[in-house]
């Protein structure tokens, strides 16, 4: 697998989505990656074509669940230096020295190849860590955030243009928070009436 260095948004989205598969974040629904099939669906949903043999195995699921903890730890770091150090550790699992290739448009692009025979989790670690390093360089460490929804324990990487994302899963946490605010306003109006 060759990971483009300048396209960090997809890898950051994968990092965020991987962290939100945890039962720590999904307390009501539990583990979102319990089986090889769920892991295959997760990877396919992000368009990831890893060189590791498919379909994923039970051991791949376990290794990715462990990776998820490491990624969460990086997103929760207090400083950019800590985040970069954590990413370097992940990158060493399968990442090789960067290479320069000419793209189809004729421009030169940096890529990080992964070691032949690297496990699925190690390739995913290299992919995510390369993206997180790109976020730190291009957008800054302050884009690593905790979800603002009350009661949510999720974390995420905000790669939005404006940098104003507030929730790890906007469609779930953001909606839940907005519904709670709406109900509180409605209740306050009925008390005042």
Image (cartoon, rainbow, N blue to C red):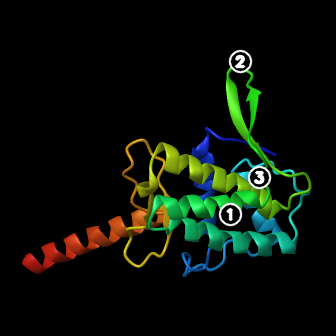
Q: Nearer the viewer, residue 117 or 68?
A: 117
Distance (Cα) linking label 2 and label 3: 25 Å
Distance (Cα) linking label 1 and label 2: 33 Å
Marks 2 and 3: CB-CB under 8 Å?
Answer: no
Q: Is residue 17 visible?
A: no
Distance (Cα) linking label 1 and label 3: 10 Å
Crowding around mark 3 (Cα neighbors within 10 Å: few <14, some 14 to 19, many 20+) is many
Q: Secondary structure at mark 2?
A: loop
Compared to 139, does 82 lie above or below? below
The picture quadrant where one finds residue 129 is: bottom right
Q: Is residue 86 visible?
A: yes
Q: Secondary structure at mark 1?
A: helix
Q: Secondary structure at mark 3?
A: loop
Q: Nearer the viewer, residue 45 or 101?
A: 101
The picture quadrant where one finds residue 72 is: bottom right
All told, the count of numbered labels is 3
**Disc sitting over residue 106 in the figure:** 2
Q: Residue at x 43, y 67 (%)?
A: 147
154 horizontally vs 90: left or right = left
The residue to which callout 1 is attached is 89
12 horizontally vs 180: left or right = right
Counting residues from the N terminus, which is met first, the one under dot 2 or under dot 3? 3
54 horizontally vs 62: left or right = right
60 horizontally vs 13: left or right = right
The residue to which callout 3 is attached is 95
């Amino acid at each position: 697998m060759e990971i483009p260095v300048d396209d960090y948004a997809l890898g950051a989205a994968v990092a965020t989505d991987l962290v939100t598969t945890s039962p720590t974040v999904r307390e009501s629904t539990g583990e979102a990656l319990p089986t090889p099939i769920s892991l295959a669906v997760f990877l396919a949903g992000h368009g990831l074509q890893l060189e590791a043999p498919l379909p994923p195995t039970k051991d791949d699921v376990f290794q990715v669940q462990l990776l998820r903890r490491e990624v969460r730890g990086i997103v929760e770091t207090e400083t950019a230096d800590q985040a970069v150090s954590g990413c370097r550790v992940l990158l060493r699992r399968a990442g090789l020295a960067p290479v320069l290739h000419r793209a189809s448009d004729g421009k030169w692009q940096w890529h990080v190849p992964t070691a032949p025979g690297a496990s699925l989790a190690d390739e995913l670690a290299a992919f995510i860590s390369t993206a997180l390093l790109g976020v730190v360089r291009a957008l800054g460490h302050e884009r690593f955030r905790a979800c603002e929804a009350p009661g949510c324990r999720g974390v995420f990487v905000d790669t939005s243009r404006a940098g104003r994302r507030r929730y790890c899963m906007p469609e779930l946490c953001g909606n839940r928070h907005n519904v709670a605010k709406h109900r509180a306003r409605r209740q306050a109006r009925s008390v005042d009436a």
